[in-house]
Amino acid sequence: PINDLSNFVFDYFRFEDRKKFDIRKNNEIGRLIYSFNAFAEKSGNRLVLLNENLEKINEELAMAKTDLKRHTRIDPVTNLCNRMEFDKQIDVEWRRMQRNGLPMSLILSSIDAFDEFGETYGRHLQDDLLMELAGIVEKNCMRAADLVARFGVNTFASLLPETDSPGAAKVAGKILEAIEKSAIAHESSKIAKIVTLSVGVGTVV
Protein backbone atom coordinates (compact mmCIF):
# COMPACT_ATOMS: atom_id res chain seq x y z
CA PRO A 1 0.00 0.00 0.00
CA ILE A 2 2.85 2.42 0.69
CA ASN A 3 4.28 1.84 -2.79
CA ASP A 4 0.83 2.30 -4.32
CA LEU A 5 0.38 5.55 -2.42
CA SER A 6 3.82 6.79 -3.48
CA ASN A 7 3.06 6.04 -7.13
CA PHE A 8 -0.33 7.76 -6.80
CA VAL A 9 1.28 10.90 -5.37
CA PHE A 10 3.91 10.90 -8.10
CA ASP A 11 1.26 10.56 -10.83
CA TYR A 12 -0.92 13.20 -9.18
CA PHE A 13 1.77 15.85 -9.26
CA ARG A 14 2.55 14.98 -12.85
CA PHE A 15 -1.15 15.73 -13.53
CA GLU A 16 -1.65 12.23 -14.90
CA ASP A 17 -4.28 11.06 -12.40
CA ARG A 18 -7.09 12.93 -10.74
CA LYS A 19 -8.87 9.95 -9.24
CA LYS A 20 -9.17 9.48 -5.52
CA PHE A 21 -7.14 6.73 -3.93
CA ASP A 22 -9.35 3.92 -2.60
CA ILE A 23 -9.18 3.66 1.19
CA ARG A 24 -8.97 -0.03 1.95
CA LYS A 25 -8.00 -0.08 5.62
CA ASN A 26 -8.85 1.92 8.71
CA ASN A 27 -5.29 2.14 9.96
CA GLU A 28 -2.45 4.64 9.80
CA ILE A 29 -2.01 4.16 6.06
CA GLY A 30 -5.76 4.43 5.51
CA ARG A 31 -5.92 7.67 7.51
CA LEU A 32 -2.93 9.00 5.59
CA ILE A 33 -4.69 8.20 2.31
CA TYR A 34 -7.88 9.89 3.57
CA SER A 35 -5.89 13.03 4.45
CA PHE A 36 -4.21 13.04 1.07
CA ASN A 37 -7.53 12.65 -0.74
CA ALA A 38 -8.83 15.73 1.09
CA PHE A 39 -5.65 17.62 0.18
CA ALA A 40 -5.87 16.47 -3.45
CA GLU A 41 -9.47 17.63 -3.74
CA LYS A 42 -8.69 21.10 -2.36
CA SER A 43 -5.55 21.52 -4.45
CA GLY A 44 -7.44 20.34 -7.54
CA ASN A 45 -10.12 22.96 -6.96
CA ARG A 46 -7.44 25.57 -6.45
CA LEU A 47 -5.76 24.60 -9.72
CA VAL A 48 -9.07 24.96 -11.54
CA LEU A 49 -9.49 28.41 -10.02
CA LEU A 50 -5.93 29.35 -10.97
CA ASN A 51 -6.56 28.24 -14.55
CA GLU A 52 -9.72 30.34 -14.68
CA ASN A 53 -7.82 33.35 -13.31
CA LEU A 54 -5.05 32.76 -15.83
CA GLU A 55 -7.55 32.74 -18.70
CA LYS A 56 -9.06 35.97 -17.38
CA ILE A 57 -5.61 37.57 -17.10
CA ASN A 58 -4.78 36.50 -20.67
CA GLU A 59 -8.04 38.07 -21.91
CA GLU A 60 -7.27 41.31 -20.06
CA LEU A 61 -3.73 41.29 -21.45
CA ALA A 62 -5.04 40.86 -25.00
CA MET A 63 -7.44 43.77 -24.46
CA ALA A 64 -4.62 45.89 -23.04
CA LYS A 65 -2.46 45.14 -26.09
CA THR A 66 -5.33 46.12 -28.38
CA ASP A 67 -5.83 49.36 -26.45
CA LEU A 68 -2.11 50.10 -26.54
CA LYS A 69 -1.98 49.53 -30.28
CA ARG A 70 -5.01 51.79 -30.72
CA HIS A 71 -3.49 54.55 -28.58
CA THR A 72 -0.30 54.55 -30.65
CA ARG A 73 -2.30 55.46 -33.78
CA ILE A 74 -5.26 57.48 -32.45
CA ASP A 75 -5.26 61.07 -31.23
CA PRO A 76 -6.87 61.01 -27.74
CA VAL A 77 -8.68 64.36 -28.08
CA THR A 78 -10.30 64.00 -31.52
CA ASN A 79 -10.29 60.18 -31.96
CA LEU A 80 -8.82 60.77 -35.41
CA CYS A 81 -5.61 59.14 -36.60
CA ASN A 82 -2.57 60.88 -35.16
CA ARG A 83 0.34 62.33 -37.11
CA MET A 84 2.40 59.15 -36.88
CA GLU A 85 -0.40 57.05 -38.38
CA PHE A 86 -0.98 59.70 -41.06
CA ASP A 87 2.70 59.57 -42.09
CA LYS A 88 2.45 55.77 -42.47
CA GLN A 89 -0.75 55.89 -44.49
CA ILE A 90 0.33 58.67 -46.84
CA ASP A 91 3.43 56.67 -47.70
CA VAL A 92 1.30 53.58 -48.46
CA GLU A 93 -1.18 55.55 -50.57
CA TRP A 94 1.56 57.48 -52.35
CA ARG A 95 3.13 54.23 -53.51
CA ARG A 96 -0.26 52.82 -54.55
CA MET A 97 -1.15 55.93 -56.57
CA GLN A 98 2.33 55.90 -58.09
CA ARG A 99 1.96 52.30 -59.30
CA ASN A 100 -1.41 53.01 -60.90
CA GLY A 101 -0.75 56.55 -62.14
CA LEU A 102 -3.71 57.93 -60.19
CA PRO A 103 -4.24 61.34 -58.54
CA MET A 104 -4.01 61.86 -54.81
CA SER A 105 -5.32 64.95 -53.06
CA LEU A 106 -4.65 66.43 -49.64
CA ILE A 107 -6.75 68.96 -47.74
CA LEU A 108 -5.24 70.81 -44.78
CA SER A 109 -7.78 72.58 -42.55
CA SER A 110 -6.57 74.91 -39.80
CA ILE A 111 -8.82 76.43 -37.14
CA ASP A 112 -8.55 80.20 -37.26
CA ALA A 113 -7.75 82.12 -34.03
CA PHE A 114 -7.47 78.83 -32.12
CA ASP A 115 -5.36 80.25 -29.28
CA GLU A 116 -7.77 83.14 -28.85
CA PHE A 117 -10.65 80.66 -28.56
CA GLY A 118 -8.84 78.88 -25.71
CA GLU A 119 -8.10 82.15 -23.94
CA THR A 120 -11.72 83.23 -24.20
CA TYR A 121 -13.60 80.01 -23.48
CA GLY A 122 -11.05 77.84 -21.66
CA ARG A 123 -9.09 74.69 -22.39
CA HIS A 124 -12.03 72.34 -21.85
CA LEU A 125 -14.18 74.03 -24.50
CA GLN A 126 -11.13 74.23 -26.75
CA ASP A 127 -10.89 70.43 -26.66
CA ASP A 128 -14.64 70.20 -27.26
CA LEU A 129 -14.17 72.43 -30.30
CA LEU A 130 -11.47 70.14 -31.67
CA MET A 131 -13.73 67.12 -31.23
CA GLU A 132 -16.68 68.80 -32.94
CA LEU A 133 -14.68 70.09 -35.91
CA ALA A 134 -12.90 66.75 -36.28
CA GLY A 135 -16.30 65.08 -36.58
CA ILE A 136 -17.43 67.60 -39.21
CA VAL A 137 -14.29 67.19 -41.31
CA GLU A 138 -14.42 63.39 -41.08
CA LYS A 139 -18.13 63.29 -41.93
CA ASN A 140 -17.49 65.15 -45.18
CA CYS A 141 -14.69 62.79 -46.27
CA MET A 142 -17.13 59.99 -46.92
CA ARG A 143 -15.28 57.30 -48.89
CA ALA A 144 -13.74 54.30 -47.14
CA ALA A 145 -10.31 55.07 -48.62
CA ASP A 146 -10.30 58.65 -47.30
CA LEU A 147 -8.26 59.28 -44.17
CA VAL A 148 -8.66 62.19 -41.76
CA ALA A 149 -5.95 62.81 -39.16
CA ARG A 150 -5.01 65.41 -36.61
CA PHE A 151 -2.00 66.89 -38.35
CA GLY A 152 -1.08 69.58 -35.84
CA VAL A 153 -2.38 71.35 -32.76
CA ASN A 154 -5.22 73.04 -34.66
CA THR A 155 -4.87 71.40 -38.08
CA PHE A 156 -6.61 68.45 -39.71
CA ALA A 157 -5.31 66.57 -42.75
CA SER A 158 -7.71 64.87 -45.15
CA LEU A 159 -6.01 62.37 -47.46
CA LEU A 160 -8.10 61.61 -50.55
CA PRO A 161 -6.67 58.83 -52.77
CA GLU A 162 -7.92 58.59 -56.36
CA THR A 163 -9.33 62.11 -56.12
CA ASP A 164 -8.57 64.82 -58.68
CA SER A 165 -8.35 68.55 -57.98
CA PRO A 166 -12.03 69.42 -58.70
CA GLY A 167 -13.15 66.51 -56.52
CA ALA A 168 -10.92 67.60 -53.63
CA ALA A 169 -12.10 71.21 -53.97
CA LYS A 170 -15.70 69.99 -53.76
CA VAL A 171 -14.93 68.11 -50.52
CA ALA A 172 -13.18 71.17 -49.09
CA GLY A 173 -16.22 73.29 -49.99
CA LYS A 174 -18.51 70.88 -48.14
CA ILE A 175 -16.28 71.07 -45.07
CA LEU A 176 -16.38 74.88 -45.08
CA GLU A 177 -20.16 74.93 -45.59
CA ALA A 178 -20.65 72.52 -42.68
CA ILE A 179 -18.40 74.59 -40.41
CA GLU A 180 -20.26 77.77 -41.28
CA LYS A 181 -23.60 76.03 -40.73
CA SER A 182 -22.52 74.87 -37.27
CA ALA A 183 -22.13 78.56 -36.30
CA ILE A 184 -19.95 77.95 -33.24
CA ALA A 185 -19.53 81.24 -31.40
CA HIS A 186 -16.04 82.82 -31.37
CA GLU A 187 -16.30 86.35 -30.03
CA SER A 188 -12.53 86.96 -29.91
CA SER A 189 -11.88 86.05 -33.56
CA LYS A 190 -10.89 88.93 -35.86
CA ILE A 191 -12.21 87.04 -38.89
CA ALA A 192 -15.81 86.42 -37.83
CA LYS A 193 -17.89 86.01 -34.70
CA ILE A 194 -18.10 82.27 -35.38
CA VAL A 195 -15.41 79.60 -35.73
CA THR A 196 -13.84 79.48 -39.20
CA LEU A 197 -11.28 77.34 -40.99
CA SER A 198 -8.49 78.18 -43.40
CA VAL A 199 -8.35 75.40 -45.98
CA GLY A 200 -5.70 74.46 -48.52
CA VAL A 201 -6.08 71.85 -51.24
CA GLY A 202 -3.32 70.14 -53.23
CA THR A 203 -3.39 67.39 -55.86
CA VAL A 204 -0.65 65.40 -57.52
CA VAL A 205 -0.62 62.52 -60.01
Image: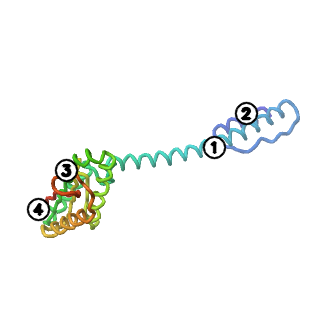
**For the residue labelled by badge 4, is the local secondary structure a helix, a strand or a loop?**
strand
Residue at horizontal 78 percent and vertical 34 percent from the top? 35
Residue at horizontal 63 percent and vertical 39 percent from the top? 14
**Disc number lying in front (3 or 1):** 3
Q: Which mark is residue 113?
A: 3
N-term mark: 4 or 1: 1
Q: Which mark is residue 49?
A: 1
In this rendering, is residue 10 above or below 99? above
**For the residue labelled by badge 2, is the local secondary structure a helix, a strand or a loop?**
helix
- Specify the quadrant that holds the N terminus: top right
**Disc number lying in front (4 or 3):** 3
The amino acid type, in three-letter code, at marker 2 is: Ser
**Disc number lying in front (4 or 1):** 4
CA distance for labels 2 and 4 = 80 Å
The amino acid type, in three-letter code, at marker 1 is: Leu
In this rendering, is residue 59 above or below 199? above
Residue assigned mark 4: 204
**For the residue labelled by badge 1, is the local secondary structure a helix, a strand or a loop?**
helix
Provide residue 41's location: percent of width, then percent of height. Answer: 73, 41
Residue assigned mark 2: 6
Q: Residue furthest right?
A: 26
Q: Is residue 205 left or right of residue 109?
A: left
Q: Are marks 4 and 3 in contact (CB under 8 Å)?
A: no
